[in-house]
Image (cartoon, grey):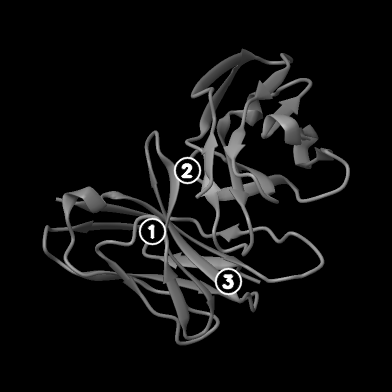
Amino acid sequence: NAGVTQTPKFQVLKTGQSMTLQCAQDMNHEYMSWYRQDPGMGLRLIHYSVGAGITDQGEVPNGYNVSRSTTEDFPLRLLSAAPSQTSVYFCASSYSSVLEVTEAFFGQGTRLTVV
Amino acid sequence: AQSVSQHNHHVILSEAASLELGCNYSYGGTVNLFWYVQYPGQHLQLLLKYFSGDPLVKGIKGFEAEFIKSKFSFNLRKPSVQWSDTAEYFCAVNTGTASKLTFGTGTRLQVTL
């Protein structure tokens, strides 16, 4: 199993450009999430999904869109990049269980710089 | 909404010293608690988790954490740190679905030889 795979690893965008950060998992997890990590602020939830076709907003959703057409993929779209979106982005997935607390598995991250 | 506080932002220890990192959360109901570690340039990895039962949980690499409900705390401990423990440590909570974690701001641990 590859786990959670994010592409690209690094990206530089110009202000106003759009792009999609890709996230794929091969563990058949229902839950997937996107976080951004900024110095001194920990990780903050952008959007999450509890299954194919179901998404919802997290703490910092503005400027980002998501969709979940398959269980495996959960892309994050930046509509019009701004310097404030310079960050490291992590995708995570987890399975649901009524018997135990499930952990989130994280991808390697995408370091995005908006100039 | 729940929040998580990590009071130690940067900790410097010598090898073999004992470690305790503080984590407090604000939520009155049932919570699931986690400690994640991020080694330089890498993704987050789970150290340990708690949701019920014995409040003292043991994780990987000799780490343990104690849940004290009355203090809303979930402090991370290790009796003797190693240079390889140099990393950033994040406390996190969720109150339901595993897809929604609330993280603390992280503690950067530097272990010197």
Could you tell me which secondary element the residue under label 2 belongs to? loop
Q: CA distance from mark 1 to mark 2?
A: 11 Å
Q: Which mark is residue A9?
A: 1
Callout 1: SS: loop
Task: Please name the residue that numbered disc 3 is placed on.
Answer: A31
Q: Eyeballing the image, is A52 above or below B36?
A: below
Residue A67: image location, x then y, percent: 39, 79
> In the drawing, does residue B19 fall left or right of residue B5?
right
User: Residue at coordinates 16% horizontally, 66% vertically from top-left?
Assistant: A80
Q: Is residue B9 left or right of residue B16?
A: left
Query: The disc numbered 3 marks a residue on which chain?
Result: A
Mark 2 residue crowding within 10 angstroms, few (<14) / some (14–19) / many (20+) = few
State the SS at label 3: strand
Q: Are marks 3 and 2 in contact (CB under 8 Å)?
A: no
Q: Which residue is mark 2?
A: B41
B48 in relation to A5, above or below: above
Task: Check if mark 1's residue and mark 2's residue have beta carbons within 8 Å.
Answer: no
Give the numbered dot on residue A24.
none
Q: Residue furthest front?
A: B28
**Image quarter for residue B22?**
top right
Q: Which residue corresponds to the image point at 53% horizontal and 22% vertical from the top-left?
A: B8
Query: What residue type is disc 1 on?
Result: Lys
Above or below — where is B111 with respect to A48? above
Q: Nearer the viewer, mark 1 or mark 3?
A: 3
Q: In which chain is the residue bearing label 2? A: B
Q: Along the line of sight, which residue is nearer the eye, A113 or B5? A: B5
- Disc 1 to disc 3, C-alpha distance: 22 Å
